[in-house]
Image: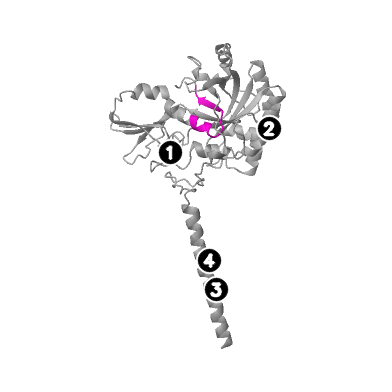
Amino acid sequence: MVRTVQRKKTFRVKKSLLIFCLIALFIAIKHFSFSPNKPVIQEQKQGSTEAQKSQSVPTENYPEYTGQMQLHVFVPYWRLSGTFDPPSIPQSSLNTLMYFAVHTLEDGSIDQSDQGYAQIGTFMTRTQESQAHKVLTLSMHDESISSKILEDDTLHTILASNLSSLAIQHGFDGIVLDLEYAALPTQEVIRDISSLTQTLSNTARSHDLSFSIAIYGDTYYRSRPYDIGTLAPLVDYIYIMAYDFHKSYGQPGPNFPLSSSGQGKASYPYSLENALTDFLQDSQPEQLIPTYGLYGYDWSVDDQNRPAKQAAAQTLNQIEAKYLPTCPETNCLITRDPVSTEMSITFTDSGNQKHTIWYEDLNSLKQKVQKSRSFSIRNSAIWAAGYF
C-alpha cells in the first residue's frame, strides 16, 4: 500500500514536471520563432539543404559612410577595347582598375600560353594615362590545378614568387587572388586556403604590392571553405562577389538580391544585406568591397518556371539592346522586383519557348551601392568593363 501511494505521488510529480516543461517549451518556441525582431525565414524553393541564416540586419551598428565612394572596375582580357570608365554613381570616383586575369599551372608557374597572360601589355598600354591603381588578378578556377597547389606548401612559395615577379615586371600596384574553390569546408581545405593566402600576401607585401582576395558572396550562407576571420588580417581588401546567387544551372532568380523580403513582396533566403552583416563579423568595413555583376541570365523555362537547360549569360549591354525600350518578343513583360531591386523579363520566343531573364542594371546597382553606405562601406567594385 505504501509503495502504491509512493508510486502515485511520483507519477503526479513527473506528470507536473512534464506539463511544466511542455508549457515552457511552447512559450520559448513562440517567442523565438515569431518575435518581430526575428522574422521567419522562408524555405529555399530549389530544395537546397543549406542552413538558413538569420534575416536580422543590424545596420544601426555601423555609422553611415557619407564620403566619396571609391570604385574598382574589373577589366577582363576579352574586353580591352572601349572605355574602362566606371558607371556614373553619385558621389563616387574611380580608384582601381583590375586586370583579369592570369592563371597558374600545376607546378606553380604562370601559364604563359593563355590570352590572359598575352594581353597584359595591351592592358598596361591602354591604362598608362590613368591615375587609377592597377592590380593583377590571379584566377584559380581549375579545381584540379587548385587542389595540387593548395595541398603543397612548396608550391605556395613558388607561385607567390612567380606572381609577384610578374606584377613587378609589368608595373602593377597589387595582386588579387580569385580562388573559386567549391570543395567541402573540411579543416584541411580551410587550412590550405589560409596557408596559400598567407604566403601570397607575405610575398606581395615584401615587394610593396597590395594583396587582396575575391570571395563568393554566399560564403557564409553556403558554408564555403574560407575562414574569413583568419584571411581578413592577411589582405588589404575582400572583394565580395555579390552576383551568381541564383546559378545558371538552377532556378531563375535575381543575380544577388539587395534584401531578403519586404512588405509582403517576393522573399529570398539570402541577400546583400545578410552578406555584409556576416562578413562584418570577421572583418572591417574599410576592407570590404561588394562587387556587382552587370549582367544576367536567360533561362528557358516550362509553364512552372522550371529551367529546361542551363541559362545563357548576357551582359547588361546585350540585354538592353535586345529588349529595351521595346521588347520584340511575344507576351513580353518587363518588371523591377522591389525586394531584390533587379530587373526581370519574361516572354515567349518564336519557337513557343518561354523565357525568364534576371539581371542587374544601373538602377539596381546604385541602390545597392547606396545601401552599402549604411554598413560603413566605402568601396564598390564592378564586374566588368565592357558589360555596361
Please tell me which residue lies in front, 256 or 15.
15
- How many C-alpha atoms fall within 10 Å of the one at disc 3: few (<14), some, or many (≥20)? few
Q: Nearer the viewer's eye, disc 2 or disc 1?
A: 2
Q: Nearer the viewer's eye, disc 4 or disc 2?
A: 4
Tell me the quarter of the image containing the N terminus: bottom right
Q: Nearer the viewer's eye, disc 2 or disc 3?
A: 3
Q: CA distance from mark 2 to mark 1?
A: 34 Å
Residue 375 within the segment the image draws in magenta: yes
- How many C-alpha atoms fall within 10 Å of the one at disc 1: few (<14), some, or many (≥20)? some
Residue linked to disc 2: 198
- How many C-alpha atoms fall within 10 Å of the one at disc 2: few (<14), some, or many (≥20)? many
Q: Residue at x 54, y 70 (%)?
A: 17
Q: CA distance from mark 4 to mark 3?
A: 10 Å
- Magenta highlight range: 370-384
Tell me the quarter of the image containing the C terminus: top left
Q: Secondary structure at mark 4?
A: helix
Q: Secondary structure at mark 3?
A: helix
Q: Are marks 4 and 1 in contact (CB under 8 Å)?
A: no
Residue linked to disc 1: 250
